[in-house]
């Protein structure tokens, strides 16, 4: 299975961005760990991060993957364009949030992706990405 790992806005700064909320692990370290996790199940992983909504949609439209793991960052809470792109991609999508969005500000409790993702991993820190890959390996092969 070819897994596409997507990270949205501000997640390129993981490691130094609000470490008290998101930890000190960098996105490069997370992507490397996810590639190893995917390989341990016999799968491949390609990673892409962008701060630009259209760039993420363009990447999804490439359709060169069998499953998606995505942390959409703040787009989670308001982007119907990202929701539509994921709804149209025709593969299982697992959503990851490093922090416990349900226990933070009110606006983070709104999730416009509900109904288009197959599974969500929330508030498990960066290892939540590995849980998402494990979930795909168990449910999407
Ligand atoms: C996040 C939570 C979002 O509310 C926030 O905008 C992010 C990161 C998380 O991983 O906990 O950028 O998706």
Image (cartoon, rainbow, N blue to C red):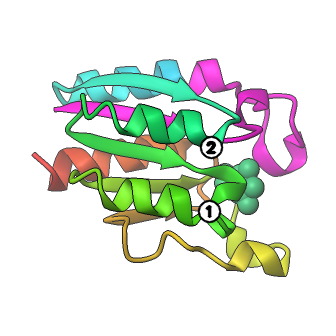
Tally of marks:
2
Residues at discs 1 and 2 in contact (Cβ within 8 Å): yes
* Residue visible at 29% across and 28% down in the picture: 38
Label 1 sits on residue: 79
Question: Dot 2 surroundings within 10 Å: few (below 14), some, or many (20 or more)?
Answer: some
Quarter residue 133 falls in: top left
Could you tell me residue 26's position as x and y percent? 70, 25
Alpha carbon distance from label 1 to label 2: 9 Å
Q: Give the range drawn in magenta.
A: 1-30
Q: In this view, does 84 lie above or below 3?
A: below
* Residue visible at 70% across and 68% down in the picture: 101
> In which quadrant is the N terminus drawn?
top left
* Residue visible at 79% across and 29% down in the picture: 13
* Quadrant hosting ligand 1: bottom right
Secondary structure at badge 1 equals loop
> In which quadrant is the C terminus drawn?
top left
Could you tell me residue 88's position as x and y percent? 30, 57
Could you tell me residue 73's position as x and y percent? 67, 51
Q: Is residue 5 visible?
A: no
């Amino acid at each position: 299975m070819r897994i596409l790992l997507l990270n949205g806005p501000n997640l390129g700064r993981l490691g130094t961005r609000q470490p008290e909320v998101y930890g000190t692990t960098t996105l490069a370290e997370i992507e490397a760990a996810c590639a190893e996790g995917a390989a341990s199940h016999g799968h491949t992983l390609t990673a892409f991060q962008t701060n630009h909504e259209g760039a993420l949609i363009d990447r999804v439209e490439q359709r060169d993957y069998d499953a998606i793991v995505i942390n959409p960052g703040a787009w989670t809470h308001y982007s119907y364009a990202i929701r539509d792109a994921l709804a149209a991609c025709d593969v299982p999508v697992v959503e990851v949030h490093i922090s416990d969005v349900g226990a933070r500000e009110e606006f983070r409790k709104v999730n416009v992706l509900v109904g288009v993702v197959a599974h969500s991993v929330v508030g498990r820190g960066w290892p939540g990405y590995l849980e998402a890959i494990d979930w795909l390996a168990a449910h999407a092969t």
